[in-house]
């Protein structure tokens, strides 16, 4: 797996993942189906952030990794 999630993208994914996880755990969402969807999305965001790989990005050929300049 080639890295395709950059540092800024990782930070944003972790923050949104934590916010969604807090929403799930606090009971702020009353619909059971929506709760499980929110939990799934939060876990996907956090896992892809720590793995620095997003399968959806790979599928469409996108990368948010910083390009290293050769000297």
Image (cartoon, rainbow, N blue to C red):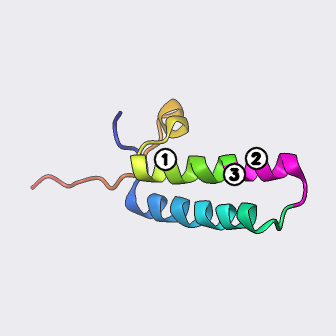
Q: Is residue 6 above or below residue 51?
A: below
Query: Which residue is at 68% across, 67% downward?
Result: 22
Tell me whether circle 3 and circle 2 mark residues in contact (CB < 8 Å).
yes
Which stretch did the figure color magenta? 30-39
Residue 69: percent from left, percent from top: 20, 55
Q: Which residue has dot 3 on it?
A: 39
Residue situated furthest top in the rendering: 59
Please state which of the two labelled residues, at mark 1 or mark 3, is closer to the viewer: 3
Report crowding for label 2: few under 14, some 14 to 19, many 20 or more residues within 10 A (C-alpha).
few
Residue named by callout 2: 37
Tell me where residue 35 appears, x and y as whole percent: 80, 53
Locate the C terminus and report the quarter of the image it occupies: bottom left
**Farthest residue toward the left?**
71
Chain-order first, disc 1 or disc 3: 3
What kind of element bears circle 3? helix
Q: On the picture, is 51 further left or further right than 40?
A: left
Instruction: Report the residue at 39% width, 55% height from top.
Output: 6
What whole-number distance in Å separates the C-alpha atoms at marks 2 and 1? Answer: 16 Å
Q: Which callout, 2 or 1, points at the residue further toward the start of the chain? A: 2
- How many marks on residues? 3
Residue 21 in the image: above or below residue 57: below
Quick one: SS at disc 1? helix
Using the numbered discs, state the Cα–Cα distance from disc 1 to disc 3 in whole angstroms.
Answer: 14 Å
Looking at the image, which residue is at 74% across and 60% down? 24
**Can the viewer see residue 5?**
no
Task: Report if residue 35 lies within the magenta region.
Answer: yes
Please name the residue that numbered disc 1 is placed on: 48
Question: x%, y% of residue 68?
Answer: 23, 54
């Amino acid at each position: 797996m080639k890295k395709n999630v950059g540092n800024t993208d990782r930070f944003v994914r972790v923050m949104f993942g934590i916010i969604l996880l807090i929403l799930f755990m606090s009971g702020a969402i009353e619909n059971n189906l929506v709760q499980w969807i929110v939990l799934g999305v939060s876990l996907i965001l956090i896992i892809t952030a720590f793995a620095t790989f997003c399968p959806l990005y790979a599928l469409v050929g996108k990368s948010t990794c910083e390009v290293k300049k050769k000297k």
